[in-house]
Amino acid sequence: MRSKLLLFALPVAMAAFLLFGYSVQDNPNNDMAPSLTENSKTLSLQLDTIPPAGFPYATQFNFNYSAIGGVNGGTVGATYFNGKYYLNRWNSAVLYRYNANGPGGGPGTLADSISGYNGGAGAIRDMTVAPDGSGRLYLWGGSASTALYKMDSLGTRLATFTHTGAAYRAVAWDPNRKGFWSCNFGDNIVCRDTNGTIIRTITNTLAGKYGMGFDSTSSPDSAFLWVWSQVTGGLQNQLDKIYLGTGLSVKTYLFNTTAASIGIAGGAEVFVQDNKLILALNYQNQATCGYKLKDIGGGGTCVYTWLTQTSGTPNQLLTVSAVNSSIGWAAGVGPTVVRTTNGGTSWTAATGTGITGDVYNIYAWSANDALCTTSPSATFIYKTTNGGTTWTQVYTLAGGFINAIQMVSPTEGYAEGDPVGGKWTILKTTDGGTTWARMATEPAQVGTEAGWNNSLQIIGTNIWFGTNNTKVYRSTDLGLTWTSGATTGTVNTYAVHYNNATTGLAGGTAMVLSTDGGTSYSSVTAPGTAGNLNGIEGNGSDWWAIRSGNTIYRSTNGAASWTNAFVSGTAVFQDLDFAVGLNGCSVGWAVGNAGVIAKMENLVGITTTSSEVPSSYLLKQNYPNPFNPTTNITFALPKAGDVTLKVYDMSGKEVAVLVNEFKNAGSYLVGFNAANLPSGAYFYRIISGGFVETKKMMLVK
């Protein structure tokens, strides 16, 4: 937070499919597995998609689009990305994007309809979301051929990866193996990287495979592929849960369709939304449904620890942006910009050249791409695409002060600033931040009101920003219209954060809560007793806050009460920012005066120390031992496989899971932080490929 007073002075395949004569109301829009002949017929509309008896996962949302023209003609999408649902057609180059404002957080209003996706070819069968080498997320998919396509959030094709022998119909990204699982209707399921290297093959001759999603979160100690298939004859769909430890299906569910070929299986994906792990399944031309696999996030499943890091600068840091557990950016006075790509083990200077003035807000979306803003006289936005080596001025406005920037996709973003000319400054970019323009729908200024740096958040189509006028502004349509909610009890709202589209906190000298998306606010217990609430973060029922001091506060009960999560000497924290990890737990940093940086993450971490293939399995004694409270454990694998490494107390109770994933052959170092455990003896045990070994360690506090 800055002081306002100071700063104001696909043809052959088609022919083959059509030979089988399937239809929906005489409209051959299905992309269907080969089957016995189905006669053309007119069928009644199915109004719902009902899971089979014994299906253990509740329906989170059911978006039936069977009566929506266009969307109901070949749509196979079940992907969620950057707050929008992607309903792409396999039989044309049209992509429909829906806002996540429907019942249960499912698709609601149509955001846009994009013609010419995937290089004008369209035809994607199944989509998944995955990073490239920069850590930035993209859409990936295939058209049942040897080509894997990389696309941006608008469906623009960015790259093509052609792999001999591959068949990219069903596609799922595996973050553990760093590869894409794929298959055609009756093929084996194969995991490849973008170079085409085969990482693993699962023998599977199930016919009709169409969609697939990776899941390492719904069940402890396990990773699975959910495979969504069309059953021969078109009267059923089959959902298989394949355990990656054995490559075998451990659960099979049969979904009856209303009639032949109505609602046959399309795409599938597993994703996190609003702290729920969702399995989304597409019923072609009919519906996309989301099934809740698990509630995640919040205090019940995540064990957090804080650790001070070395920023490499003595300058005051005013703003921080967490991309993921490895990549973070921070900025402040000087100008000063620092960046980490290794989780904060080291921070390096990224001020580079081109920036003038103190940096009051920074937003990054990869190790290379970031935007920041300064206001030495006029207000500026700068952009870097090379990790901060050089910064290019991409916007300026005389007499303004830009408070915060947020991208909602790799191309679309928004910035909010103090009023100029009687209207708030609301900027939009559609080219990744290279150019910006004020929106014609900016809200009018009331009196002399202004805003605060970092006090901005966007979720889906919702935008909120804080003010100095006992209100928080809100838009539900990405800036086309605006309202505000009164924050009675605090004039200034230096910080605003929403955990979902309805529940959010705002803070100044006091704290207020909204449970209706910002229409109204009510007073709640604020953490601490003095100072301004200049940073708020959250996830599920968890909240964190800073108050112009050395303490980071945490609430695990929806802000009903607060405890001290971390205290750092004489630090004065100015901002904090978190990302949500693949396990649904938060990770991120807090920054402040004198270059202070502290990181919050889960209890454990793992580092590859050598990719050289060891001659045998090995589990070493932890070092140091005894320890307080951190120690390191080294293990070696002579071949790739699933690995578990767990810690147990003397009673045999499991107290920590250090590793639970597939690992390539090599040597690894695992860090274990026992800050939340009492002194005593503990055992750690590794299991991999038939190798089992246990060792003892001593925690002395």
Image (cartoon, helix red, strand yellow):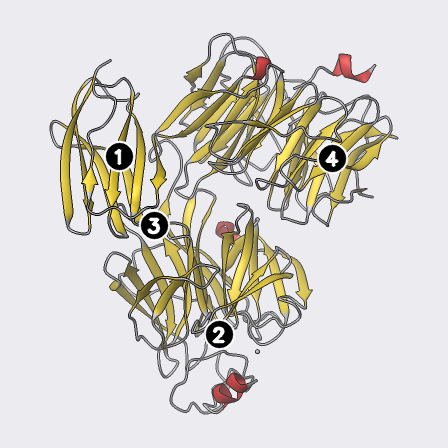
Question: Which labelled disc corresponds to residue 382?
Answer: 4
In what element is the residue under mark 1?
A: strand
> In which quadrant of the rendered image does the C terminus lie?
top left
Say which quarter of the image contains residue 300: top left
Residue displayed at 31% across by 75% down = 206
**Which is more foreground, mark 1 or mark 4?**
1
Q: Which residue is mark 2?
A: 144
Q: Is residue 697 left or right of residue 81?
A: left
Q: Amino acid at mark 4?
A: Tyr
User: Callout 2: 10 Å neighbours few (<14), some, many (20+)?
Assistant: many
Label 3 or label 1, whichever comes before in sequence order: 3
In what element is the residue under mark 3?
A: loop
Distance in Å between CA atoms under marks 2 and 1: 42 Å
Label 2 or label 4, whichever comes before in sequence order: 2
The answer to which of 686 and 510 lies nearer the viewer is 686
Label 2 or label 3, whichever comes before in sequence order: 2
